[in-house]
Amino acid sequence: MRRLTPNVLKAQMCLVKMFTDLQTKTLIQENSLELFIDLNQIPNIIAAFVQEEIKVFGADRITRTLEDRFLEMTGGDGIV
């Protein structure tokens, strides 16, 4: 799931409180966070962001192909 927010650092700190293994679940980009989570956790995360006054401008579900997941795991970005 990708969340668009102008305050990525504050959002990340909020997520640290919720998840102990945050490093393996989050990719941080300029104005977005990509979270690798169970869909059932989404309402709790949104509620936590609202409570912390973190503005969320969008949330998108991202699905990756098997090939994408393989490349992420192996660190490869092409065939040698």
Image (cartoon, rainbow, N blue to C red):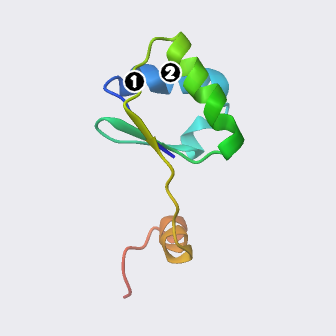
Can residue 3 be seen here?
no
- For disc 1, the marked residue is 9
* Label 1: few (<14), some (14–19) or many (≥20) C-alpha neighbours in 10 Å: some
Instruction: Kindly identify the residue that appears in the image at 58 percent across and 44 percent down.
Output: 25
Callout 1, which amino acid? Leu
Callout 2, which amino acid? Met
Observer-nearest of 79 and 17: 17
Which x, y percent locates residue 30?
A: 28, 37
Position of residue 61 relative to residue 76, above or below, is above
1 and 2 marks in contact (CB < 8 Å): yes
Q: Quadrant of the C terminus?
A: bottom left
In the rendered image, which quarter is residue 14 located in? top right
Which x, y percent locates residue 51?
A: 55, 11
**Disc 1 from disc 2: Cα separation:** 6 Å
In the rendered image, which quarter is residue 10 located in? top left
Instruction: Kindly identify the residue that appears in the image at 46 percent across and 24 percent down.
Output: 11
Q: Secondary structure at mark 2?
A: helix
In the rendered image, which quarter is residue 22 located in? top right
Q: Which mark is residue 29?
A: none
Instruction: Kindly identify the residue that appears in the image at 48 percent across and 70 percent down.
Output: 68
Can residue 15 be seen here?
yes
* Label 2: few (<14), some (14–19) or many (≥20) C-alpha neighbours in 10 Å: few
Observer-nearest of 16 and 38: 38
Q: Secondary structure at mark 1?
A: helix
Instruction: Kindly identify the residue that appears in the image at 64 percent across and 30 percent down.
Output: 43
Q: Is residue 9 left or right of residue 68?
A: left
Position of residue 56 relative to residue 66, above or below, is above
In the current view of this chain or complex, which residue is farthest to the bottom?
A: 80
- For disc 2, the marked residue is 13
Position of residue 79 relative to residue 71, above or below, is below
